[in-house]
Image (spheres, coloured by chain):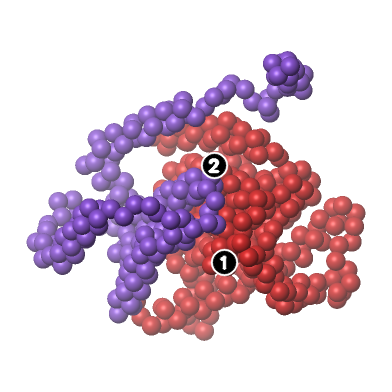
Chain colours: A red, B purple
Amino acid sequence: MGIDYIIATIIKIVIVMLVFSALAGFGTYFERKILAFMQRRLGPMSVGPYGILQIMADGIKLFTKEDIIPTSAVDKIFKIAPIITASTAFMAAATIPFWPDFTIFGYRVQPIITDSSVGLLYVIGVMAIGLFGVLLGGMASSNKYSLISAARSSAVFLSYEVITGLALLAPIMLVGSLSLVNFNAYQVGGISNWLVWKQPMAFILFWIAAFAETGRTPFHLIANDHEIIDGFGTEYSGMRWGLFFIGEYANMFFISFVIVLVFMGGFGDGSVLSALAFLGKVAFFFFFFLWTRAAWPDVRPDQLMWLCWKVLMPLAVINIVITGFVVMF
Amino acid sequence: MFEAIAFYIFSILTIIMFYITISTKQPLYALTSLGAGMILISGFFFMLGADFLGVVQIIVYTGAIMALYAFGMMFFNTTKEIQEPRHDSGAVVTLSTVAAILVIMIFVGPIIGDKMVSLYPPLQGATNTQSIGMVLFTKYLVPFELAAIMLLVAMVAGIVLAGKKMDRSLTLMTEEEIAMEQEAKNKVLV
């Protein structure tokens, strides 16, 4: 492990951080625009052409807004909580390959921070730690809406982690590896080799669970505006609230990458065309998050738990048993 | 060299985190620092090349156990400091004795470790996950299955203890059934 490896890794980390922080900002713009078009509105239009500079205005507002900390809150935990959400979202990206290997200035670049042998498990595990940001933020705010949101978040995350894990187990059994690069290699050779055809049930279960893991509509109970204000974010203002937002959007991007890498063929054989198709697929899954938000209402908490434990979990277990038999014989 | 730097950073941070856990009076500080300490321990697994165990440490201890602790703490007012009434000198004596023995063992450990021979050396070319699977399903098959049965028993017991009116679901009931149930309840009150 030489010094060049360390430098290369640090450069990769900085690039991933910068690109996805910026994308989180663009994500809010896309979300507002897409929601607006689906609801026959125009969305942000005033700042810049088609409102594209709205992100800058939002950024200036978030950075310069007064950072209010309630008197009765546990101030240290209150301050740390948004950082936990944002940092775990970015840490989860460490084992995701964002582009096939390429050569630049004579260096062979692997656009993945570390190709660990347990990549997939790491992504899911670290993403699940993001729960603590919401949980601690809600508990430290000393606000009853925040507390309700914290309780809901831990219930939802703990339940849907089970679905995520069980749904991914079947593809893992087929591929025989936890590395996302190996997942990609397994599916090289066209659309017919994608895992989604072999594991349609796992794909749908994981996709549903992805909505819960990122806390998006229809599972947006942790910050349900019409009943618990903004949930864990009620007491937050300025950039601390912005960090929660960056974490949520980064999670949406990273989970889209994971869905595409595991089920939809990833970047295929590594040619430029298939790599662009890879980004296109990721963009579609990100778009689907926004589409669902425009089209679906939220479900009730009891419906959410019913769906998790009485519908999705048995299906996931049956899927694993069937896959096990197929792999064995 | 980088390994040494990482080791010292991780160990100092781990000790600080666990010290905060036991010394603070604020339950949220204790919860947060315990969770952080558990994650920092996974750093040691990664440094030793045991990637799988490192990730499992994160998922099981921080993702599952700590989250359950936090879920339990919903029932307290976590913003208030807690005054512990007990000052048991017996516990202090026992704990410091155990700590002293542990320190001795830490220093003696490398001497014993040099003489140890691995009975089941890791297979050449097998990844971390594969070697764990092989050991788990050959040498430790019986303990593994026993643990599985114990977990199953605990799960069934948990469901039986916690589940009241398991056959009743508001989601599956029709409006009339809910209305009838509500009426029956009102009659009892009258």
- Residue at position x 61%, y 62% in the image: A72
Q: Name the residue under label 2.
A: A159
- Residue at position x 53%, y 45% in the image: B75
Q: Which amino acid does label 2 sit on?
A: Ser
- Any part of residue A186 in sight: no
User: Vertical placement of B13 versus A256: above or below?
Assistant: below
Q: Which amino acid does label 1 sit on?
A: Asp
- Any part of residue A296 in sight: yes
Q: The N terminus of chain A lies in which quarter of the figure?
A: bottom left
Q: Which is nearer the eye, A118 or A189?
A: A118
- Residue at position x 81%, y 55% in the image: A35
Residue A248 percent location from the top left of the image: 64, 59
Q: Is residue A2 left or right of residue A308?
A: left
Element type at marker 1? helix
The image quarter in which residue A36 lies: bottom right
Q: The C terminus of chain A lies in which quarter of the figure?
A: top left
Residue A66 percent location from the top left of the image: 71, 74
Q: Is residue B20 left or right of residue A312?
A: left
- Residue at position x 85%, y 71% in the image: A51
Q: Among all residues in the image, which is located at the extreme left?
A: B115
Query: Between tags 1 and 2, which lies in front?
Result: 1
Q: In this view, does A234 lie to the left or right of B120?
A: right
First in residue order: circle 1 vs circle 2: 1
- Gap between marks 1 and 2 measured at Cα: 29 Å
Q: In this view, does A140 lie to the left or right of B57?
A: right
Question: What chain does badge 1 belong to?
Answer: A
Q: Mark 1 points at which residue?
A: A75
